[in-house]
Amino acid sequence: MSPAPERPVTRGHSSPVVRLPRKMLGALAPPTWPGTVERPLPRSHVGTDYDTSWSRTPVARLARAMITDNITRPFVRLAAAPTVVGAEHLDPLRGPVIFAANHSSHLDTAIVLSALPVRYRHHCVVAAAADYFFDRRWKGDLWSLALGTIPMERSRVNRRSVDLAAELVADGWSVVIFPEGGRTTDGWGQEFRGWTAYLAKRCGVPVVPVHLHGVRPIFPKGGNRLRPGEVEVRFGAPLRPLTATATASEGGHGREEDARRFGARVEQSVAALADEAETDWWSARRRAARGETPDLRGPDAAAWRRAWLLPESRRSNAGVRRRTPSAPW
Amino acid sequence: MREILVERSLARFAAARAASVVAGAGSGITVGPLRLADREPRALPGPDWHRVSPVLAGICGSDLATVDGASSRYFESIVSFPFVLGHEIVGTVGGGRLAGSRVVVEPVLGCVARAIEPPCPACAAGRKGACERIAFGHLKPGLQTGFCADTGGGWSDGLVAHTSQLHAVPAELSDEAAVMVEPAACAIHAALLGAVVPGERVVVLGSGTLGLATLAALRHYGQPAVVVAVAKHPVQRDLAEQLGADQVVRPEELERAVRRLTGSLGLAGGGSPSRLTGGADVVFDCVGSSSSIASSLAVVRPGGRVVLVGMPGTVRLDLAPLWQREIALVGAYAYGTEQTPDGPRSTFDLAFELVAAARLERLVSARYPLERYEEAVRHAANAGRRGAVKVVFAIGRSSSPAWRSGPPNTESVETNA
Amino acid sequence: MSPRPGFVLEVDRSTPPTLFWHGEGWRLERLPAGSRVVYPPEPLPALEDPDAAIRHALEHPAGDSSPLSALLRPGAKVTIAFDDVSLPLPPMRAPDVRQRVVEAVLDAAAGAGVDDVVLIAALALHRRMTDAELRHALGSRVFDAFAPHGLLLQHDAEDPAGVVHLGLTDHGEDVEINRRAAESDLLVYVNINLVAMDGGHKSVATGLASYKSIRHHHNVRTMQQSRSFMDRHHSELHTSNWRMGRLIAKAGVKVFQIETTLNLDTFPSQFSFLQKREWEWSLRDRAAFHATSAALERTPAGLKRQIFQSIRSPHALTSVHAGEVEAVHELTLADVHRQQLVRVDGQADVLTMGLPYICPYNVNSIMNPILVACLGLGYFFNLYRGRPLVREGGVCIMSHPTPWAFNPVHHPSYIDFFEQVLAETVDPLEIEAKYEESFATDPWYVHLYRTSNAYHGVHPFYMWYWCAHALQHLGQVIVVGGDRAAVRRLGFKPASSLADALEMAEDVVGRDPSITHLHNPPLFLADVT
């Protein structure tokens, strides 16, 4: 007898949601698969294999526009009361751009979408973690409809997802990306991953740095309830990779800025926006000019000191929760 | 001749069951299958049979189960209606060569009493309690005197008994002591079946007659390191302490006490362990209810033994612990022949010894005439709560001088029920 | 108006009935004319800027100690130990004093660039605190900075790798304390000195010690020789702790002691009548008293417990001292005495007291009968300096419902102690000799102490030893309004009313006894001449 077919690693979408007992189906019960015949693995339809093209059809776009304007934005106004700063940087922009924002909460996507000008709001996709938002078919369906998400691997550059993003940009779609690859656990930022800069260079579109200030106290990672508060959404000046002449004039190597350096510049711009949110525009500018902008990733010190020095706007309301034995009365 | 007769009436058994559930133990007496009847004396079933006039007849837990219609239907085929209850009997022999002598009746109706030749293997080996012929022979079915239509029972003016069932009572033993011989024999049989090895830790669950007698038997015939007795009521607590319990606890304290004693850990339930990892080596369940068997299983160690001394019926039990902890659940019924260091001896002989040594007559706490059987049964059903242990019928006049002097610590007739 | 000191009232015919605590409630009782009622002093004013006072204390230490900032350097190993949930009583309103002090210490540590900082709740053999309790004591900022990284620990006296033996005192006492604390470059201990017993060398030598070490002073002999353990200079308990503390210092453990005192403002304003003298009750107080009493009568016991346990006290900081242990403690004692001392002339035949719903060991829990005994005969009886408020052979009358009820999570060994030990004997010496060892080493209690929120197996014994001095001194103990079975199990006499209790007391001390009533809340220390 040949070995029993392996359990598929990912769930096939052909399997019925509810399986009726064979007895109830009687003669209509599906035939059983012979043990001697190898069973093919079903095609995966989740993770980066999830096909989001349906969510960009006119009908789905219309539905999403309704959801964004009638559900998402009112909800964000109630929970986070966003103030938008620096929207003027977006005025001269036409055509697709990449929005790169810091990430501390599930609310971030909704807040960014709410803050975008109409022409971008209804014509953009959001790069979302394939392992979290697309691990079940229904989740993929839900998020790609409501927020226009596309699956993206968190940690490595996945050809399939970058190709998809590049295709979309070429098609005129803007992309919202959280380059940290996940929400912060301790309030301090994480290293920006490479694909933002890579995508921008490949498609030749500008990157707009975005900083969200004060979201973590409202709903941090691991939080179990929403504590409404106020946030600031700050857009920075669009960034493009320096041209060969520019690098040369700065005394550099005279080649076009590479993805790594460009990515670092994007991260610095977001950090400068963060500094501006904590203090004021002028002192943040001066620090940026001196190269003294506080690192988003926080000091390189013991965990308690990192926590101790965390600004109020990035603190969590969740903390550690373990079940406390209840009193027996 | 007056007898308290139990008749076959499904309706009345059901009524008794209902009454006892609604109004509490013993309430089956008024609506149940019992009545005080006046009947002609029975014919002697054979040449070796004698008439016995009970002097004292005890009320046993199994009798109360019958009264309340709570007995298992398992017994239907090994009793014969109408029967007269009462199998803890001390009486006087009415005629023949034993006339006038004071005897204790050993109630099991085995092959010898049933004149079955050759006897079944159990009877041949002296294990009368395990007789395979209790529904056969020239007698109607009945596992014991007190459940057989042909013999009568102790709750009457007279019954018939086979010579092999009679044990002469030594003159120095009071009637009260003698009426305790039968329950003591059950307790000894159970205690020895538990095979307590010296140094083992033992729990006796229940401090009624059987529990206290088992305690006494354990102390007399074994060397357990510690005996924990479970008692609900103050009188029971005192007696358990007097009879040799090292620790007397209330039912709700048992698990904690055993946990402390055996140094085991607890599982689940925070600081109040709902399950123990270890437990007692042997548990004697002298109650026989679902909850008592469940708590026996809860406090016995893995690989330990639970001996069912009290009569159980249909119970609802989770046997997962029995399976996972490899617990031996052993029944202990009646008596026969016991293996002792001095060779095999009849359980009844040992019981006579134990009753005298442990002064078990102190367990007899109330006596009633037959006419007041309803009150007597109610008293027995609530014995612990009402400060009693063994309730007996005082029926005939004893031939023994010890009876006339009266035992020291019992009321002569309970008048104030 | 400056706060009035405590005073002793002589009851006459026009004195209104006196308030007695009675668990989750109270009784108004008429004491016989001629009885004396000792009233506590009024609360001292709070420090105006507590945070500034704390910072000042840290930089201007008492005794032979450098300022805190001079003791902190990058790369140092610093441990901050703090008093556990047993202090203060009732738990105080946020921010807790510990939060203020710990934040000030951490600000200094962060400023000095100290990376290796660990916080330890000095539990001794008490139950572990829950996360909510830790968060309340330390504040969210500290909790969130330390707990997620495993830097907020609770002392585990049963962790063989977590304690270190520092040697024997000249009296042969083992000194074994928390390893992390002992091996730190600096151990900062944050105290709340609610009563005169707290603080000093007892903080580290008991709070961070193991059973092996604690048993040298938590035993019947020591407790009987502590007259009282609230008076450090006449307390064998403290003398032993001082020997241990000096050995700890000699072993090279650098302790920076911070002690704080609170004023007697114990209950929030809706219960202000509790802290007032009965004849000064305003209309509002009288209305509050009757409304609360009527409501409590109709409230089930569990809910009452919940209501009372949720009370947060308005306690305010009155002083803070930091530096070398002994110098700090002398200053603190003076501040405790300044608030709490009441002078009482002579002893009485009968001492009466009302016992509240709370003692150090049942915060967020049930006050079980053993704790009732301990609060009355352990704590209240010992709130004296000089000699006890009641004469030798006298009678102590306590008022408490004393329910036969236990919290099985917090007090598992208490249940067994009550059911199995007190059922056999109530003699502290016999109990100590026969049972202590087996309870202290019972693996189940050890497991619950280390992993759940249970008091150590030996803890109920300490509660009973706490009573040893009173049990030896008194002729009889009577509990008014208690569960009869539970009171009898404790070896005391139950009485249904104070009048009955006084009648019963006369059988012991003779007719027309002199009576002193300890009026609380709040707590105070009687200076008996």
Image (cartoon, coloured by chain):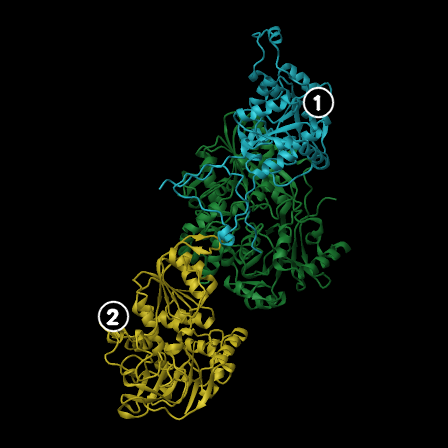
Chain colours: A cyan, B yellow, C green
Left or right: A223 with respect to B171?
right
Q: From mark 1 to mark 2, how far is it between C-alphas?
A: 98 Å
Residue sitting at 63 percent across and 38 percent down? C319
Give the residue number, with chain letter if any, for mark 2: B340
Q: C222 or B304, which is in the foreground? A: B304
Q: Amino acid at mark 1?
A: Asp
Pinpoint residue C297: horizontal percent, then vertical percent: 67, 61
Residue A280: numbered disc: 1
Q: C455 or B289, which is in the foreground? A: B289
Q: Is residue B398 above or below residue C342?
A: below
Query: Circle 2 — which element?
Result: strand
Q: A281 or A57, which is in the foreground? A: A57
Residue at the farthest right position: C283
Pinpoint residue C344: horizontal percent, then vertical percent: 62, 53
Q: Is residue C418 above or below residue B192?
A: above
Is the C-beta separation of discs 1 and 2 under 8 Å? Answer: no
Pinpoint residue B90: horizontal percent, then vertical percent: 35, 84
Q: Amino acid at mark 2?
A: Thr
Query: Circle 1 — which element?
Result: loop
Residue at the farthest front position: A27
The part of the image, by quadrant, that contains residue B255 is bottom left
- Chain bearing tag 2 is B
Left or right: A138 with respect to C202?
right
Q: Is residue A61 above or below residue B138?
A: above
Q: Residues within 10 Å of mark 2 (few under 14, many from 20)?
A: few
The part of the image, by quadrant, that contains residue C277 is bottom right
Q: Residues within 10 Å of mark 1 (few under 14, many from 20)?
A: few
The part of the image, by quadrant, that contains residue B354 is bottom left
